[in-house]
Image (spheres, coloured by chain):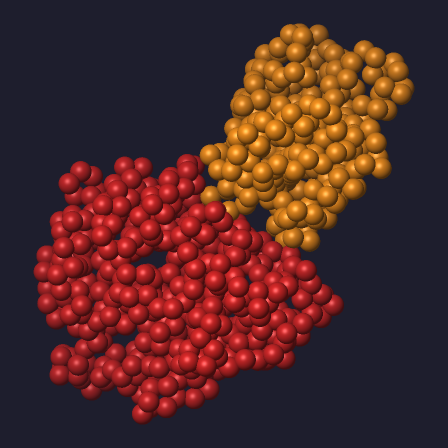
Chain colours: A orange, B red
Amino acid sequence: MDAVGDVQRVLLLGGTSEIGLAVVRRLAGERKVAVVLAGRPTPRLDETAQELRGEGHAVEVVGFDGTDRASWAPAVESSFSGGDVDVAVVAFGALGDAERDWQDAAAAADLVTVNTTAPVALGVDVAARFRRQGHGAFVVLSSVAGERPRRSNFAYGATKAGLDAFFTGLREALRPEGIRVLVVRPGFVRTKMTEGLSAAPLAVDAAAVAEAAVTGLRGGRETVWVPGAMRYVMSILRHVPSAIFRRLPI
Amino acid sequence: MSTTSNAPRTALSGWGRTAPSVATLVPAGTDEDVRRAVLGAGDRGVLARGLARSYGDSAQNGGGTVLDMTAAARVLSIDTTTGLVSAEAGVSLDTLVRVLLPLGLFVPVLPGTRQVTLGGAIAADIHGKNHHVKGSFGNHVVSLDLMTADGQVRTLTPEGAPRLFWATVGGMGLTGVVLRATVRAVPVETAYFSVDTERATDLDDLMARLQADDDQYTYSVAWIDLVAKGSSTGRAVLTRGWSARRDQLPKKLVDKPYHFAPRSLFTAPDVFPSGLLNRATITAFNEAYYRRAPKEQRGAIQSIGQFFHPLDIAKDWNRVYGRRGFLQYQFVVPFGQEDAMRRAVARLSQAGTASFLAVLKRFGPGNEGFLSFPTPGWTLALDIPVGAGLGKLLDELDELVVEAGGRLYLAKDSRATAATLHQMYPRVDEWRAVRDEVDPQRVFTSDQAKRLDL
């Protein structure tokens, strides 16, 4: 990242993530940058790469699968083989099926693997690379769902809570190395992942998350809520007695 | 890496305090220290660092080794008859000024701060207020010792090894480590300057005055107001002068013509919030500066500090820009491209990019340095606090500068792109060819070199 926060090379873990792509585009601004798109090797990933190339960016595609542990380390290795990475955006994850994921053990385990285990493991390897290159920044897409589990989606919330806690701690471990970790906690984001769900209050779109993330990164922030008001909503909700909390229409 | 594994890893940034990176910092007191680091370099490479006055990432090497050259700072010899001075690369120009003045000598080129090293002065091919008549620092280097990637020390002169010499002058430390150099100092009768000051009402008036009689002066620079609105945009205070003769000194100075005892009056504390220097405070500063300057004054006697380095009175003055830091944007456009300068000034002024330190100067001929910045034309330099939208504005200015056939100064640059820079320096491929001969593995590298694909 240069003096004004422009980037040369960005790694997007979750190469088809709408929010992740919005962050990458926002980071690039009007410049042409190098993007490593890492994600499940699907036609959709290649289409996304083509789109970015069409916008003038130099794109490398790296395949990995959030459920396939053996694919994680090699993905980080090849993501850094073409040069230093300025910013790694950790943006992959699954919403799951809230009712299935607390009743089906395999489904629950899979959700934890994709949303927590994989980003943590990939994060460890990326952190090692960042330390080696002497610079780097994480942008981690967490969720307010992790701040206090709700009956309606606590399996998802639990995976994000684990992710959030790990990267919040990693930030301190990496601070002496000059590496930054920005944790982004959006509320309800209208994307293809949430299509069909009725939007919660304070819903935002991917562009708003991207803007908050990039402004936060350039401004030296370490945690951002999107929208900003969500921070105060959540700090109240965290302390609402559970007898009341469970009756709230959220 | 084994040789440096015990050395501390340190976050290093440039003078603008933006975009730091972490490297292994190794004191380089002797040639052997340098050789050990160069031959033991890992794949993240090595870079020499001096007093870190380059604004951006020129003296950073994230993940690699950075040699602290200030550990080798001895003056080796001075020949008062020829003016030839030999010193180790880590010696500061401040030290050289102090050592040379009592002998009736002065450094040939002095930039806007004395706190730069000899090695850095060569690597950035620095310029000063006398560029229009004396050229840049490299013009005055008689010879230099360079440790190349093979660990050999090569003594380079412009006659004996012109390609490597001129790839090293302005080469940003990427051809090797400058260990020592011999430069030709200039004789002076006093430590003072006889200074003419005048005001210019706008940019055109300023450029006309500079075109008219700049070459009569040894030193020349204009402070320019980029925040004043309307027809006052580009109003300027022009200060030009010569090294003062002894008979020009007032009585109280005649007995000590070489007296030079600058002091830092205070150190700026590290507590300033970002945004303290905003449009309001900077506008007020600029107004006061312009009003305070005499409309016209001839032959005022000023000290080195007053004339060259008004900011050095506050040590660590870069801290007043706060945590987000600042950058300096400096470009040159060739003569005949005055309109590009007008448009750049208008663009900066209109964007409300507050700068309390903007200077304009007329450059003379450039030298043979492949990546040397100065080229005949107009150069504008300004400090800008980092804030939202700055990157986009400067990208637009880069485009304007490229179209005008101009370029940016590498020692100030902290955010340009490789594509832009390569357009600005048409000889960059020739430079790379020379560098690849002496450093095919790219042992010498920097964050800037990576960013700009040098």
Left/right placement of residue B359 relative to residue A25 reads left
Task: Name the residue: 16% across, 53% down.
Answer: B206
Q: Position of residue B439 (x, y in %)?
A: 59, 67
Number of on-image labels: 0
Q: Position of residue B396 (x, y in %)?
A: 37, 40
Say if residue B383 shows up in the picture.
no
- Residue toward you, B171 or B14: B171
Task: Relative to B204, say whether A169 is above or below.
Answer: above
Furthest residue toward right: A105
Task: Relative to B31, say whether B298 is above or below.
Answer: above
Task: Name the residue: 74% across, 12% down.
Answer: A152
- Residue toward you, B292 or A98: A98
Q: Position of residue A118 (x, y in %)?
A: 78, 33
Left/right placement of residue B73 relative to residue B63 reads left
Task: Relative to A236, say whether B1 is above or below.
Answer: below
Left/right placement of residue B236 relative to residue B125 reads left
Q: Position of residue B26 (x, y in %)?
A: 62, 69
Task: Name the residue: 32% across, 61% down.
Answer: B375
Q: Quarter-wise, where is residue A197 in the image?
A: top right
